[in-house]
Image (cartoon, grey):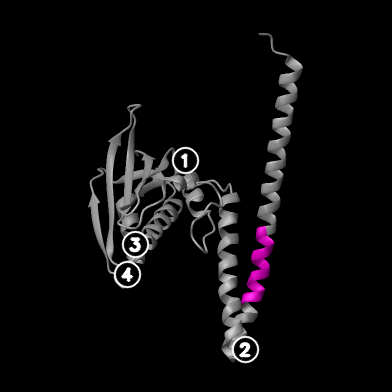
Amino acid sequence: MAVNSSTVTDGLTQNLRRLDRLASLGLIAASVAHEIKNGLLAINTFTQLLLEKSEDREMAEVVQRELKRINSLVTQMLRYASHKPATHGTVQVHQLLDHSLRLLEKELTVRTISLKRDYRALPGTVHGDEAQLQQVFMNLLLNAVEAISGSGELTVRTEVAAEKSGSKKFKIHISDTGSGIAPENLPQLFVPFFTTKKDGTGLGLAICQRVAQEHQGFIEVQSELGRGSTFIVSLAVD
């Protein structure tokens, strides 16, 4: 069947215009988010002064709590919109995981969550951006901790495994014994702004997936209601 070249050209033109509008919208959103952060800084400073003077303390605390929530959302938006190039180098994954887990020690103790480490990946290094990878690990570890109501277990395991294509991946498994994820929500977990949390932004996992992809990898999820979830970060082997 013959294809009309003008139809194809029109279709490509429309797609390019659509992409251009999306790019412009992203730039506008990032600019607005940046200005909101500047405004929030001034408001937060004023609120802090009220708290120090104990004037309208209850109202000031409410305002401050909401400011923190909005600031968190705007920060996530800026991170998602940012295309700042990563600074790649050799990353000691096990050391980075241990550092992240140390930051969560108090939370694990308060929630009576036991921690299990099972580091099998050798050598324990990848080529990547340490700050970005820590952001991924912290986000997934925090999600795992929050998924556990009452006591439970958090397991962090690493391995080097071969893919079907024959290439090898450095895999980090972060497992919890929480309530699990509803099957209908699994396909949407990494979609920007999708969240099941009351005060969630829906950007954390989207950012994590993008970082993994920028490291020639990906994140997948295995979950069963009532038994917990496992997030698996697969990265290119160093």
Q: Is residue 67 above or below residue 144?
A: below
Q: Image point 53% across, 54% down: which residue? A: 202
Residue 117 drawn at (x, y percent): 24, 55
**CA gap, disc 3 to disc 4?**
8 Å
**Picture coordinates of residue 198, whole percent (x, y):** 51, 63
Residue under label 1: 213
Identity, as a three-letter code, of the amino acid under mark 1: Gln
Give the magenta-colored segment's residue range: 33-44
Between 150 and 55, the one lying in front of the other is 150
* Circles 3 and 1: CB atoms closer than 8 Å: no
Q: Earlier in the sequence, mark 2 or mark 4?
A: 2
- Give x and y (percent) for residue 225: 35, 51
Q: What residue does disc 3 label? A: 148
Q: Are marks 3 and 2 in contact (CB under 8 Å)?
A: no
Residue at which label 2 appears:
56
Mark in front: 2 vs 1: 2
Q: Looking at the image, which is closer to me, 179 or 166?
A: 179
Q: Are marks 2 and 1 in contact (CB under 8 Å)?
A: no
Residue at point 56%, 51% (across, down): 80
Q: Say whether disc 4 or disc 1 marks the residue closer to the N-terminus.
A: 4
Q: Does 101 appear above or below 88?
A: below
The residue wearing badge 4 is 111
Which of the 4 image quarters holds residue 42? bottom right
Classify mark 4: residues with Cα within 10 Å, few (<14), some (14-19) or many (20+). some
Tag 3: residue type?
Ile
Q: Secondary structure at mark 1?
A: helix
**Res 129 label:** none
Question: Which corner quadrant holds the N terminus?
Answer: top right
Q: Report the amino acid beneath label 2.
A: Asp
Label 3 vs label 2: CA separation?
A: 36 Å
